[in-house]
Amino acid sequence: MMSYSIAGKELRLKRLLPSGRGVVFAFDHGVEHGPSDFPREYINPRTIIGKIIEAGVDAVMMLPATAFMTRDLWIGKTSLIVKITSKTNLRPENERLLQSIFGYVEDAVALGAEAVAATVYWGSQYEDAMLRQWFEVKRLAEKYGYPSLQLSYPRGPAIKNMYDVEIVKYGVRAAIESGADLIKTYYTGSLESFREVVEAASGIPVLMSGGAVRERFIDFLRDVENVIRAGGRGVVVGRNVFRHKNPGGAIKAIMKVVHEEMPPEEAIKYAE
Ligand code: FBP
């Protein structure tokens, strides 16, 4: 029996990163961090999603219900990645290192997504539970022809610095050996160190995880530039965009750096 799903996965990967690079807007913070993460004017998901899509972002990554609630805004305009694990910060602190099931691969299929995403906190005391989830995601994603994006986040009691290049590389190595088709991970702070991260991924596309808000947006654009120069394929960004005074402009500036290799000093003009 032919495995027709190989074609589906290849097709979706191509649609997601047509040029090999991409800018994805991450929007699961209402659960991961709580609504206080958002400026008040963006409390309704539709407001910010509308602005980001209007700016021409390549893809949006959302939880299934948020994707459904904003469907008229993204359908036919941008690609969707459905994230099906999450956790709240309302949990006791020692249980925040566990992501729980927040939807199913079938939800991603039903919503018309290009990929399905799940987080693994490598090094967590709950690593085993997240691996069970990951391989359940993987099994069905493979069956239906969907690429799986792993948010490869090393964090746990034995990890002192989760941005350390050796730690990030370990997470990336574990991501490829667990079958990730796309990897989203932490920026390690320099072009040279991120090059090592990209090498560890051995050809599997690596996207930078946006992270906490940089004081100066130009510094964020410089990080993105380093990621691209190091061979990274782009960025999955949330806070540095939705907390920017001009989120649509911020996305445009990031797109210029990722797709056109425009110097940050020039690209930042789009965000003014
Ligand atoms: P950011 O660009 O805001 O960092 O978004 C990326 C992301 O992975 C989100 O998908 C998620 O909600 C958040 O970061 C998790 O942040 P934390 O590092 O606090 O777990």
Image (spheres, rainbow, N blue to C red):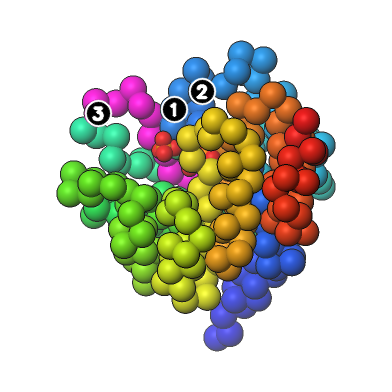
Q: Residues within 10 Å of mark 2 (few under 14, many from 20)?
A: some
Kindly identify which numbered label has been placed on residue 33. Answer: 1
Q: Residue at left 57%, top 21%?
A: 38
Kindly identify which numbered label has been placed on residue 93. Answer: 3
* Residue that numbered label 2 is attached to: 37
User: Percent position (x, y) of residue 193?
Assistant: 43, 62
What amino acid is found at the position of numbered circle 1 in the picture?
A: His
The quarter in which the N terminus is drawn is bottom right
Q: Quadrant of residue 232?
A: bottom right
Give the SS element for disc 3.
helix
Q: Quadrant of residue 46?
A: top right
Foreground of the two, 211 or 40: 211
User: Percent position (x, y) of residue 266?
Assistant: 78, 46
Q: Is residue 131 visible?
A: no
Q: Is residue 128 visible?
A: yes
Foreground of the two, 236 or 246: 246
Kindly identify which numbered label has been placed on residue 202. Answer: none
**Residue 86 located within the stretch drawn in magenta:** yes
Q: Quadrant of residue 3?
A: bottom right
What amino acid is found at the position of numbered circle 3 in the picture?
A: Glu
Range of magenta residues: 80-93
Q: Residues within 10 Å of mark 3 (few under 14, many from 20)?
A: few
Q: Residue at left 24%, top 53%?
A: 123
Q: Residues within 10 Å of mark 1 (few under 14, many from 20)?
A: some
Q: Residue at left 60%, top 73%?
A: 5
What amino acid is found at the position of numbered circle 2 in the picture?
A: Asp
Give the SS element for disc 1.
loop
Foreground of the two, 57 or 142: 57
Compute the Cα span from label 3 to label 2: 18 Å
Q: Are marks 1 and 2 in contact (CB under 8 Å)?
A: yes
